[in-house]
Image: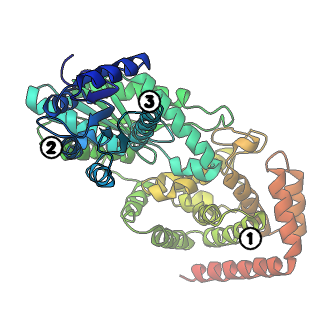
Amino acid sequence: MTEHETSVDVCLIEDDAQLRHLLMKWLIEAKYSVMDAGDGAEGLGHIMRHRPRIVLTDLQLPLINGIDICKQVRSDSNFDGTYIIVMTEFDSRENKHRALGNGADDFLAKPVDFVELNACLRNGFRVQRLQERLRRAALTDGLTGLANHSSFRGAIDREFARTRRYGGCVSLLMLDLDHFKAINDNFGHEMGNRVLKATARHLSQAVRDVDVVARYGGEEFAVICPQTSGDEAGLLADRIRRALPDNARISEAPQLTVTASVGTVCSNDSRVASVNDLINLADQALYAAKRRGRNQVVKAEELGDPPIESSLQVDVVERLRKQVVTLSMQSKELCVQCVWSLVQALEARDPHTAWHSRNVSYYTQVCAEAAGWPESFRSAVVTAAMLHDLGKIGIPDSILQKADALTPSEAAEMRKTPLLTCKILEPLRIFETEMLIIRHLRERFDGSGYPDGVAGQNIPIGSRLLAVTEAFDAMTSDRVHRPHRSMGDALAELRSQSGRQFDPQFVSLLEKVAVEQSEAWVEHMARSRMNVARRTSELLFI
């Protein structure tokens, strides 16, 4: 038996040969694996080499006594889980206190009562099993069963040290699920947990046995790949990314597509001098993948390459997108306020837009409160209502201000408004939930909508409510090519499209709230129409 190769159940240390033989015979018959020693020095050597689960030692021993054995074992953190039982024929309160005070877990008087000894051993193994479960729990993510962050850090430290000692390399993949907050907000945290577990299974099946897959935190995962070059890591990352949508699909939510952004780095990168460098470069590559549009792999070695601009001409949508990027380090509330100021600035082109966003926010807030939605999700849906028309900055004036009905091609351009809004907001991860709601604003309940043609309950719930409140305000507001409809006419039109364009439950909800608060809503509509008319008149004289 070599050092640390095999752990045994019990190390018996007893200088009385006859008693040692008797105890050995009993322990072996009880199916324990045992090694024995006749003095304290030999016994301590066995403990250090073979790491027994339980030490059964006499108090009075040649060379090193039982108390000193307790002290030395307890001084080494590698033996924190070792259970020590001290035996003595000098069964005094003082000896018992000395033994327990110096690290013994149990105390037996001689002559040994084998029933009592058996109970002590059972206690020892019960404690061992509990400690092992706690150790695994401390190193394992409870949701996914993967290594947790602490375990990941230990593994990457060991692998990196091995490359520096023996040569070779280690690669690190950092993977982050795209728009995961929006999944939680729109489909619930239980669905989010199922996505995380499905992703964990996919990662575990995609890698080699020697690789370590860890949940780094939240929706971020890490894969440690020993003896793997940067090119090999890039290929693995792309295989993982490409297969993820199929392998992490949830049958109850077929419209939910799970994608991920991945950053990779290899320890032979000249910028890597420490484990922290390795992790930081992988993180930088991951966030570069996010910035470049998500659902892609970026290798750290690419980060130093200058960006290739296909054209110096940057359209108005891209300029606005870059403006919004500068807000990303501020709080969400401040970001909302700043982006809302951009929506208000659209009044210079189309005074209806800003008031439409205000009105839709108002109706959405009231309906979400009536539906009893949680405050955090209610806030996200109202923010989506506030920002959903931001993409009109990319629509030509000839379409926005056209007095006649739009042609099919012009209507198609207008349908792109939600997608343009999402493109502008994309750099701000804090708006992930709002972007998912806005993206599906033009879906129809019967599945004939835009852009993905999803239907019924598969449309995000926030999008279904926002579609109703947005249509209601559009109908009850004046437009360049038509006057407003009455509240009754608008409600009738919503009912006629219930189950086709709109979710019936939200048509009913809006109608119920509108009737209950009819006086306030009529006053609100009149005030907004007056403000739009005044602003339109002012613009004519500018």
Question: Circle 1 sits in a helix, a strand or a loop, which is it?
Answer: helix
Q: Tell me the residue that label 1 is attached to.
A: 366
Distance from disc 3 to disc 1, alpha carbons, whole Å, reads 75 Å
Local crowd size for mark 3, using a 10 Å CA cut-off: few (<14), some (14–19), many (≥20) = few
Task: Tell me if 104 is positioned left or right of 116 in this view.
Answer: left
Residue 295 in view here: no
Q: Quadrant of the N terminus?
A: top left
- Residue 292, compared with residue 3, is above or below; it is below
Give 278 or 501, whichever is nearer the viewer: 278
- Residue 514, compared with residue 274, is above or below; it is below
Question: Circle 2 sits in a helix, a strand or a loop, which is it?
Answer: loop
> Foreground mark, 2 or 3?
3
Q: Which of marks 3 and 1 is nearer the N terminus?
A: 3
Image quadrant of residue 153? Answer: top left
- Residue 6, compared with residue 74, is above or below; it is above
Q: Residue 274 carries which label?
A: 2
Give 304 or 316, whichever is nearer the viewer: 304
Q: Which of marks 2 and 3 is nearer the N terminus?
A: 3
Q: Percent position (x, y) of residue 325?
A: 38, 60
Residues tagged 1 and 2 counted as in contact (Cβ below 8 A): no
Amino acid beneath label 1: Val
Q: Tell me the residue that label 3 is attached to.
A: 114
Task: Tell me if 388 is positioned left or right of 231 in this view.
Answer: right
Amino acid beneath label 3: Phe
Q: Earlier in the sequence, mark 1 or mark 2?
A: 2
Which residue is rendered at x = 20% and y = 43% of the image? 76
Local crowd size for mark 2, using a 10 Å CA cut-off: few (<14), some (14–19), many (≥20) = some
> Foreground mark, 1 or 2?
2
Q: Percent position (x, y) of residue 300?
A: 24, 39
